[in-house]
Structures are given as structure tokens and as C-alpha cells.
């Protein structure tokens, strides 16, 4: 198995769990991690145990500044990890403070096969602007993101030619939804010649992981009828807790703007308007409030109407279903990049590598 080196931008829930899961994947070596305060880089491989222990701690209650020019946001947009007198990654003995952590990674990009962007998406163009920095810095490897919002895909497609010319393979929407569940829908659709609908219904129990994933919860709240990206970003921690209390800890989401729709359309599976995404989030239990399923309804070549359903076991956690696929898509992206295939690719067009 070919060795793959990778970096993680952002040390919130997604970034931390990615580093943790990578310890169980052969041939994957994390060599860099950063947040908006500093960078840890070691091309012999980061000491993940030490890094995770050092960055374990409290999270600022309000969103941190999202920086694209001089640094990376962290903790999935929920401030920074704090440990003693140090903040974020800098608490690790492997790290050093930096005024521009993203630049630190870009400057060493020739030795980094892939970069996972575990960053918040409070501005619609944030991830595309981070991609611009890698383009401008001369990076020619793989960028992987677990973005959610449908409208971001078009912004990445606008950069397709520039990414191809630079030799960058950008795997977009490579988590659970979009990601694993998008790919499952694409496979389930193969039985049919005409797709009527794709329904993705997820369930997440987050009690033990709530502190690490407050930023993810904030992003989800932006999908509620009375909120949007801007209003959710402006919520204080107390206001978020009030929303959670109003829902007795279990928040239901309907018709979410998840990129599964446009990713399935760009792969030729179905029209974006035929895809719906919703789910249940329970922040007071680790048990899923509902089973995560993908249901694809269509008509077969012989005129039969049916529904194929893909189901995730309730025992698999959010981290397992987000970070496992993210690393699988990362590895697949590296293989494609090494074969000279560049540009933007989605999870319905790429089979993740174990």
C-alpha cells in the first residue's frame, strides 16, 4: 500500500476525530495540523496521542474569527481549544505559534499528499477562498472537504480550470452527508432507469461529543426555518443552549440545504430537486434518535417501481460515519491525483479507498 501523508486544517471535532481515526488506517501518516493560533508539522509523523491530549480542554463559547488570509479557524468555528496558558495546537510540544498557519502548510506542500479542510463554513465562499490560497501558493496535491451547503459546489466548479492547471484534485463533500450517503444513493440508483426521489434521513446522538462539535451544531441550527448562516453565526452559546432546551435536546431538520442534491445531479444520477435531506440531532444522548437511511425510489427497465434502501447501523457513531469516509475519499483522491486526474470530484463519482 502506497504511503500517504496528509495535513488537517482545523482542530475542532472533525479535525480531532480525523487524526484519531487515522491511527487505525495503514499507510496514512498525519504530518501537519493547524488552527488559527499555530501549526504542528513533523514529516516523520505527528504524535497524535500527544497532540490530542494537549488540545483537549475548554472551548470558547462564541465563534472565533474566521480567517482566510492570515490564519485558519478552529474548533469548527466555535473558538479555540484552550489548555493552561496556551491556546489551540500551540498547547502541544510539537507545535509553534504562527501568524499564518495555512501558509505554513502551503509552504511545505511538496511533502504533503493531501489536506483535509476541517474548517467552518459560515460564509458560503469560505472553503473556495481557502482553495484559492492553495492555488496561489503553488500546491499540487489533494484537497478534501466535508462541506454541507449546496451553493458551495458551484463556486468550486468555477475554479475547475484553475485547479486542473495547478494539478489539484479537490474532493468535495466527503463526509457522511454529503459523502458516504451520497455515494450510497448513487449505488442504489443503479437498479433504475428513472429516479423518482432520493430521501436521506440521518440520526445523530451527540451527548459525549457535544463539546467538540458545538460548531457543527451551530451550522445545523442554520438550517432551521427561523435561522440562516448569518443569524446562526451571531448566536451566543447561551442562545444555542436555549434553542436546544426549546427542543428538549432533540432537534428535527427538514429540507436541509445539503450538497447531496447538486452532487448527485452533477454525477448524472438524478435532478437536484428530487433529493431531500433531513434528520434528528439528539445532544443529550449518544444513542441515535432515528436510524440513518438513504431511500432511492425509481422505475426499473422492465417497468417496476421500487425503493432501494441503504441503512447505517445505529452503533456507528457520527465520527465513524464522517471521518472514516473522509479518509477513504482522501486516499482515493490521492490515487486519482497521482494518475494525473485533476479538478473537482464529488462522492458520487469516486469510490473511497479503505
Image (tube, rainbow, N blue to C red):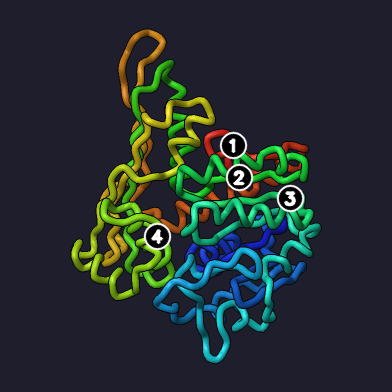
Q: CA distance from mark 3 to mark 2?
A: 11 Å
Q: Residue at x 75, y 55 (%)?
A: 136
Label 4 – label 1 distance at C-alpha: 32 Å
Relative to 214, is 173 above or below?
above
Residue that carries the numbered disc 4 in the rendered image: 230
Query: Residues under labels 4 and 3: Cα distance?
Result: 32 Å
Marked residue nearer the N-terminal end (2 or 1): 2
> How many numbered markers are drawn?
4
User: CB atoms at circles 2 and 1 under 8 Å apart?
Assistant: yes
Residue 275 found in image quarter: top left
* Real-space Cα separation, disc 2 to disc 1, in angstroms: 9 Å
Q: Could you tell me which residue is drawn at 55 percent across and 75 percent down?
A: 52
Characterize the local packing of mark 1: few (<14), some (14-19) or many (20 or more) Cα atoms within 10 angstroms.
some
In percent of the image, x 28 and y 71: which residue is there?
239
- Provide the residue designation for mark 1: 350
Q: Work out whether mark 4 precedes mark 1 in sequence or the reverse, and give the earlier one.
A: 4
Disc 1 or disc 3, which is closer to the eye?
Answer: 3
Q: Secondary structure at mark 1?
A: loop
Residue at position x 30%, y 64% in the image: 283
Amino acid at each position: 500500500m502506497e504511503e500517504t501523508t496528509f495535513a488537517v486544517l482545523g482542530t475542532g471535532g472533525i479535525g480531532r476525530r480525523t487524526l484519531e481515526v487515522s491511527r487505525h488506517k495503514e499507510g496514512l501518516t498525519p504530518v501537519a495540523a493547524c488552527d488559527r493560533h499555530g501549526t504542528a508539522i513533523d514529516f516523520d509523523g505527528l504524535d497524535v496521542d500527544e497532540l490530542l491530549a494537549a488540545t483537549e480542554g475548554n472551548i470558547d463559547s462564541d465563534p472565533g474569527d474566521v480567517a482566510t488570509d492570515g490564519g485558519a479557524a478552529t474548533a469548527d468555528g466555535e473558538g479555540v481549544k484552550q489548555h493552561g496558558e496556551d491556546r489551540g495546537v500551540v498547547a502541544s510540544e510539537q507545535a509553534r505559534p504562527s501568524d499564518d498557519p495555512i501558509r505554513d502548510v502551503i509552504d511545505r506542500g511538496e511533502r504533503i499528499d493531501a489536506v483535509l479542510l476541517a474548517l467552518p463554513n459560515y460564509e458560503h465562499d469560505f472553503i473556495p477562498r481557502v482553495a484559492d490560497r492553495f492555488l496561489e501558493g503553488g500546491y499540487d496535491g489533494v484537497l478534501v472537504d466535508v462541506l454541507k451547503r449546496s451553493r458551495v459546489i458551484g463556486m468550486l466548479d468555477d475554479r475547475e480550470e484553475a485547479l486542473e492547471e495547478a494539478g489539484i484534485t479537490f474532493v468535495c463533500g466527503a463526509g457522511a452527508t454529503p459523502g458516504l450517503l451520497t455515494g450510497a444513493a448513487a449505488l442504489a440508483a443503479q437498479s433504475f432507469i428513472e429516479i423518482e426521489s432520493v430521501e436521506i434521513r440521518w440520526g445523530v446522538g451527540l451527548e459525549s461529543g457535544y463539546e467538540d462539535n458545538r460548531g457543527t451544531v451551530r451550522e445545523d441550527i442554520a438550517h432551521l426555518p427561523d435561522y440562516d448562516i448569518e443569524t446562526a453565526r451571531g448566536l451566543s452559546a447561551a442562545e444555542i443552549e436555549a434553542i436546544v432546551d426549546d427542543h428538549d435536546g432533540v432537534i428535527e431538520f427538514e429540507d436541509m440545504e445539503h450538497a447531496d442534491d447538486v452532487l448527485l445531479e452533477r454525477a448524472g444520477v438524478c435532478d437536484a430537486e428530487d433529493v431531500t435531506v433531513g434528520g434528528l440531532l439528539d445532544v443529550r444522548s449518544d444513542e441515535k434518535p432515528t436510524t440513518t437511511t438513504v431511500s432511492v425510489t425509481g422505475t426499473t427497465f422492465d417497468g417496476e417501481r421500487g425503493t432501494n434502501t441503504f441503512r447505517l447501523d445505529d452503533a456507528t457513531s457520527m465520527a465513524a460515519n464522517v471521518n472514516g469516509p473522509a479518509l477513504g475519499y482522501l486516499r482515493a483522491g490521492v490515487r486519482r491525483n497521482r494518475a494525473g486526474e485533476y479538478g473537482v470530484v464529488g462522492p458520487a463519482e469516486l469510490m473511497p479507498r479503505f
